[in-house]
């Protein structure tokens, strides 16, 4: 989608610090980390947020979670938080579905 930051990162127009890439998914480190380990997993296909997940694209979400599990093992993090902000009031600043994966510190609950 035109003018979408994460679509531009997905197609290489904007550089990122990549952890993993295949035809469908990209994982890259967050530019403003909120924990010692903080990376994002995105589908390359533009999906606006969790609110746009449906039967046509949910397989990508399942694959994203498989990737999160694999990367966590590879990075040696066995305790981590996965967050997807959906909508401005929930803190979403980039309107392209992404999963934050954070580790390396304690996290409070409920999330702020
Ligand atoms: P959210 O606020 O939940 O939509 O998350 C968007 C995340 O994208 C924030 O944690 C930002 O720090 C991160 N971010 C914004 N621009 C970039 C970029 N160019 N490269 C990596 N992460 C970014
Ligand atoms: Zn996009």
Image (cartoon, rainbow, N blue to C red):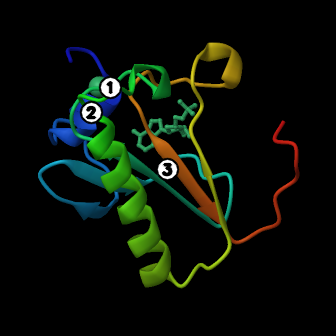
**SS label for mark 3:** loop
What residue is disc 2 on?
Answer: 57
- Of badges 1 and 2, nearer the viewer stands 2
Asked where in the image residue 3 lies, by quadrant, the reply is top left
Give whichever of discs 3 and 2 has the lower sequence position. 3
Task: Give the mark nearer the N terminus: 1 vs 3.
Answer: 3
The residue at which mark 3 appears reads as 30
In percent of width and height, residue 44 lies at 22, 39
Q: Which sits in the foreground, 48 or 103? A: 48
At x 62% / y 15%, what residue is drawn? 88
In the drawing, does residue 71 fall left or right of residue 59?
right
- Vertical comparison of 31 with 85: above or below: below
Q: Position of residue 65 (x, y in %)?
A: 42, 57
In this view, 30 is above or below 77: above
Q: Is mark 2 within 8 Å of ligand 2?
A: no
Q: Is mark 1 within 8 Å of ligand 2?
A: yes
Q: Residues within 10 Å of mark 2 (few under 14, many from 20)?
A: few
Instruction: Between label 1 and label 3, give the one nearer the viewer.
Output: 1
| Element marked by disc 2 | loop
| Residue assigned mark 1 | 47
For the residues marked 3 and 2, what is the alpha-carbon distance in whole angstroms?
A: 24 Å
Quadrant holding ligand 2? top left
Neighbour tally class for label 3: few under 14, some 14-19, many 20 plus, Cα within 10 Å: some
Q: Mark 3 touching mark 2, by CB under 8 A?
A: no
Label 1: which secondary element: loop
The answer as to whether callout 3 falls within 8 Å of ligand 1 is yes
Residue at position x 16%, y 42% in the image: 12
Residue sitting at x 31%, y 50%: 16
Which of the 4 image quadrants contains residue 107?
Answer: bottom right
The residue sitting at 28% across, 52% down in the picture is 26
């Amino acid at each position: 989608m035109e003018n979408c930051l994460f679509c531009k990162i997905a197609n290489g127009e904007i550089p990122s610090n990549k952890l993993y890439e295949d035809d469908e998914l990209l994982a890259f480190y967050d530019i403003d980390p909120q924990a010692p380990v903080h990376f994002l997993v995105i589908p390359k296909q533009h999906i606006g947020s969790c609110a746009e997940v449906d039967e046509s694209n949910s397989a990508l979400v399942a694959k994203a979670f498989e990737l999160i599990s694999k990367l966590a093992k590879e990075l040696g993090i066995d305790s981590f938080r996965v967050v997807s902000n959906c909508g401005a009031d929930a803190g979403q600043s980039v309107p392209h579905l992404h999963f934050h994966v954070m580790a390396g510190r304690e996290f409070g609950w409920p999330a702020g």
